Amino acid sequence: MPKMKTKSGAAKRFLKTANGIKHKHAFKSHILTKMSTKRK
């Protein structure tokens, strides 16, 4: 079987750093006005 390409959509979501992989958490981008700061 051919080698699998890195999933390009996933590659955009993760950031490879020296000590592992960083990623932005979901549900933190919009409609934040009605959320309490504790829930943010």
Image (cartoon, rainbow, N blue to C red):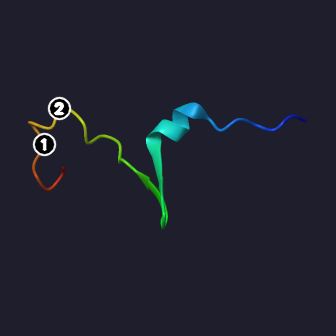
- Which residue corresponds to mark 2? 31
**Most distant residue in the right direction:** 1
Residue type marked 1:
Met
Left or right: 4 in relation to 17 = right
Q: Residue at x 30, y 40 (%)?
A: 27
In terms of image quadrants, where is residue 31? top left
Left or right: 28 in relation to 2 = left
Identify the secondary structure beneath mark 1: loop
In the depicted view, which residue is nearer to us: 20 or 18? 18
- Which residue corresponds to mark 1? 35
* CA separation in Å, label 1 and label 2: 8 Å
Q: Residue at x 47, y 46 (%)?
A: 14
- Above or below residue 16? Residue 1 is above
Residue 17 placed where, x, y %?
46, 59
Left or right: 11 in relation to 35 = right
Left or right: 15 in relation to 10 = left
Residue type marked 2:
Ile
Residue 6 placed where, x, y %?
65, 38
In the depicted view, which residue is nearer to us: 13 or 28? 13
